[in-house]
Amino acid sequence: MGRAKKVVLAYSGGVDTSVCIPYLKHEWGVEEVITLAADLGQGDELESVREKALQSGASASLIADVKETFVKDYAFPAIQANALYEGRYPLATALARPLIAKVLVETAEKYGADAIAHGCTGKGNDQVRFDVAVAALNPHLKILAPAREWGMSREETIAYGEKFGIPAPVKKSSPYSIDRNLLGRSIEAGILEDPAVEPPEEIFLMTKAIAHTPDEPEYVEIGFTRGIPTSLNGEAKNSIELIEQLNQLAGKHGVGRVDMIENRLVGIKSREIYESPAMVVLIQAHRDLESLTLTADVTHYKRGIEETYSQLIYNGLWYSPLKAALDAFIQKTQEQVSGTERVKLFKGNAAIVGRSSENSLYAPDLATYGAEDQFDHKAAEGFIYVWGLPTRIWAQQGKR
């Protein structure tokens, strides 16, 4: 089945993506498979992943360190947009997909490949995210998804790989499907498919169980510059450092777990468990800083934009005209969003307990109920009369 001559394959080192290499060559007639593993801070030993690709038949095996780009160009804009899918999920996994797609396309163009391949199945969101992002960045590239079409069970996939010298997983495979990067982990499958079952403690890695968290609260001050987090406890941090340290800090106090029934793009509901300590805290803190520095109408209008923005990320439309237009709006709103948020971490909660900004719109002399009060109370009566006039006329009309 000759579909393409030279293919760049998104590679993780797992069974499916490893089997994709001989499958593309022997079943679909691909002449050359180049693998690409993106280093997103997942903590894997990527050198062994690189070696495995070559042993599995790849002509070249590449690793792209994209951690800094991932945080600066993908995570930070999502924080500025307070992007939480369905109000809860901070999109840690979804944000990685457009970046991986971008690196795949750049690699294909560099090596003269005519197709991109990935190991996604037909039930998930990631196939949509990869396919749509690649099409947006280079519509001339073919997109191959062997695992979506081969129809093999996991056992059959392993057996197929063994025929071509790909070793079966040494240990019994975990019943869970786990994706990890610098921003967090997503855990699904196994007993988690029963939405009534409480997640077992063994699945968590970044967040402590409440019973094992410190018995004293810990305070952290997060500094923002134009909506971007830039410091912790008064110390300037680079993007990767800031996320790593806040993950550790918040995770130690059990902050950042999400257990939800999620509406997938392909039309099914899925039970998902997420750990994303830093992103949960940063979005909460950023939103609070906006309440201090943005006018009421901008704050209220931006809420609807944020909902749309999070859906665009989840649905694989990072590279789309609407996303670009919303980016322009969001960047404009962030010009005044600089300041410090004080967060109290304790027993699974991240509570905002203080905030300050040079751009604060909070006027103490107007807000106070003390003797310093400068608010003109007499002006309120006329305002209420005009404000309530349409309601009064409507009520009178109804009594006629």
Image (tube, rainbow, N blue to C red):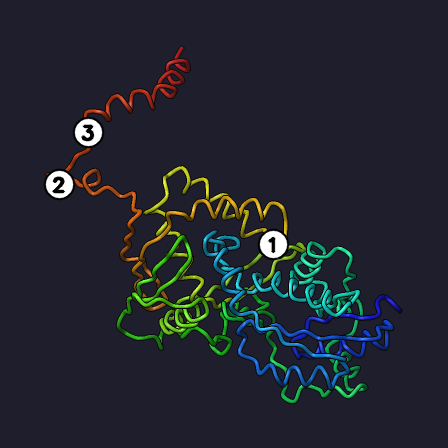
Nearer the camera: disc 1 or disc 3: 1
Q: Is residue 117 left or right of residue 90?
A: right
Q: Between 249 and 225, which is closer to the camera in this rendering?
A: 225
Q: Between 99 and 346, which is closer to the camera in this rendering?
A: 99
Task: Say whether marks 1 and 2 touch (CB < 8 Å).
Answer: no
Quarter containing the C terminus: top left
The kind of residue tagged 2 is: Gly
The kind of residue tagged 1 is: Trp
Give above or below for 332 relative to 344: above
Measured from the top left, where is residue 38 in percent x and y? 61, 72
- Determine the secondary structure under disc 3: loop
Q: Which residue is mark 2?
A: 370
Task: Say whether marks 3 and 2 touch (CB < 8 Å).
Answer: no
Measured from the top left, where is residue 205 in percent x and y? 47, 76
Q: Which residue is mark 1?
A: 318
3D distance between C-alphas at marks 3 and 2? 14 Å
- Determine the secondary structure under disc 1: loop
Q: Is residue 297 left or right of residue 30?
A: left
Q: Which residue is mark 3?
A: 376
